[in-house]
Image: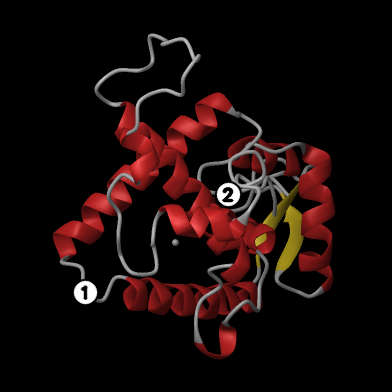
Amino acid sequence: MPTHPDMTTDIMTNDAEADAEIDVDAGVGAAHPAASQAPERGTAATGEEHAGGPVLDAMQHQVAVFARRAEQTRLGGVGQARNSMDRAAYLLLNRLDQEGPMGVKALAAGMGIDSSTVTRQVAPLVDSGLVKRTSHPEDGRAVVLQLSPRGAVRLEQVRASRRDLMALLTEEWSEEERESFCTLLTRFNTSLLGIHPSTTPGTPAS
């Protein structure tokens, strides 16, 4: 359940100050005090200062905290497979597993990155035997990338590790809460794709 724009750069420049605003580790997810304060003296009100302002302010902060902590932990699973595969490799293998064999251009288009990036990222996967180049089933002159049997086994190991991590992080959640979170996160990632087409949903481009 795929390297990297750092969403925290412009939003948070001081980790200590950021953590002081919301105690995320303690499970406090409500809007932080700054979100409900009036605009600073001398700051003109804008049309964006509406009823949703405090929620949006808390949301942008939580996204920044999440981005930083995801980068720190890499969310690479648990156990022996933890952080054993970088996100770029994971997302490429996952795409090939879900969509089947495809050319570099099709793979790049589906992931929202350019062909040169795909070529660079897939090279070590081919060298390690996780991906193989083969002839296109309908056009023998064309070459496509295909997940190898070894790649399929390796991908499932990493997936299982990541599933275990998600289970651990949400062990006190109900199944409905997990489904709701997944639905909203997918929708959020899709919105990000619309704003930044070079980034595939849920994944940095490099």
Q: Position of residue 161 (x, y in %)?
A: 48, 79
Q: Position of residue 160 (x, y in %)?
A: 44, 78
**In the foreground, 92 or 137:** 92
Query: Do the CB atoms of the residues marked 2 and 1 lie less than 8 Å apart?
Result: no
Element carrying mark 1: loop
| The image quarter in which residue 200 lies | top right
Residue 137: mark:
none
Quadrant showing the N terminus: bottom left
Q: Residue at x 19, y 58 (%)?
A: 177
Q: Residue at x 55, y 54 (%)?
A: 17
| The image quarter in which residue 166 lies | bottom left
Asked whether, in this view, residue 11 is left or right of residue 206, the answer is left
Residue highlighted by disc 2: 203
- The residues tagged by marks 2 and 1 sit, at their Cα atoms, a distance apart of 26 Å
**In the foreground, 14 or 129:** 14
Q: In the figure, 188 relative to 134: above or below?
A: above
Asked whether, in this view, residue 27 is left or right of residue 202, the answer is left
Residue highlighted by disc 1: 172
Q: Nearer the viewer, mark 2 or mark 1?
A: 1
Q: Residue at x 61, y 61 (%)?
A: 71
Q: Position of residue 197 (x, y in %)?
A: 61, 29
Q: In the figure, 32 relative to 45: above or below?
A: below
Q: Amino acid at mark 1?
A: Glu
Asked whether, in this view, residue 168 is left or right of residue 172, the answer is right
Q: Position of residue 30 (x, y in %)?
A: 27, 49
Using a 10 Å C-alpha cutoff, classify the residue at mark 1 as few (fewer than 14 neighbours), some (14 to 19) or many (20 or more): few
What's the colour scheme? secondary structure
**In the foreground, 42 or 14:** 42
